[in-house]
Amino acid sequence: MAFDADARSIVLRRYWQHVIEFALLCVAAVLGLVLGVLVSLPLIKLGAPKEVFTYAPLVAVAAVSLLGVLWLEIWYPYRHGGSTPAMRWLGLKITTLRGGEPSLRDYFVRWLLMAVDGLLLGLVGAVLIAVTPRNQRLGDLVAGTVVRRVT
């Protein structure tokens, strides 16, 4: 399958988008870990069981990671014209196939199907983006959305 220059640019930008967003989520997870440790230390001094030092950071990392992904993949693009922060930096935007604004449900479906697109370290989504005519991953195909370059 031959790519024109614009399709190749979109594919590469989408790959970079996921790398940037993964890095942002890793930073948020580390901050959650630090927050969990900082919260657990005073609790232990107040007499809480020592297990608090083990579980509080884990709970903080899990909460920050989940909330961060929900914010990044669903809420932020819904409230900011179809772009995540990385998409804005890279000049990409999520639209419906007809060019309109996706609904909150569309963003939720895209996010749910990231579980499939992310299989094999993202290879499933990467292959689908590379071989589908509109460079869509499974989440985009099911939600009826497409990622376009903003000009």
Image (cartoon, rainbow, N blue to C red):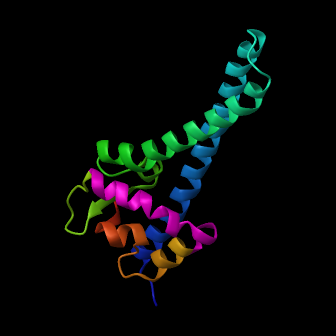
Count numbered badges in the picture.
0
Task: Locate residue 46 relative to residue 74 in the image: left or right.
Answer: right
- 23 in the magenta segment: no
Residue 91, quarter of the rendered image = bottom left
The residue at the far right in this view is: 50
Q: Residue at x 67, y 20 (%)?
A: 39
Image coordinates of residue 93 in percent, x first then y, are: 34, 57
Residue 150 appears anywhere in the view: no
Give residue 149's position: percent from left, percent from top: 36, 63
Q: Magenta stretch containing residue 114, yes or no?
A: yes
Q: Residue at x 23, y 55 (%)?
A: 101
On the image, the x and y values in percent for residue 5 come to: 43, 76
Residues 117 and 96: in front is 117
- Quarter of the image with the C terminus is bottom left
Residue 22 image offset from top left, x and y in percent: 59, 51
As drawn, the residue found furthest toward the bottom would be: 1
Magenta range is: 104-123
Main secondary structure of the magenta stretch: helix
Q: Residue at (33%, 71%) from the top-left corner?
A: 142
In the image, is 124 to the left or to the right of 78?
Answer: right
Which of the two residues, 25 or 135, is positioned nearer the viewer here?
A: 25
Residue 22 shown left or right of residue 10 in the figure: right
16 in relation to 56, above or below: below
Examine the rendering and report whether any part of residue 66 can be seen.
yes
Q: Nearer the viewer, residue 94 or 37?
A: 37
Residue lying farthest to the top in this orientation = 46
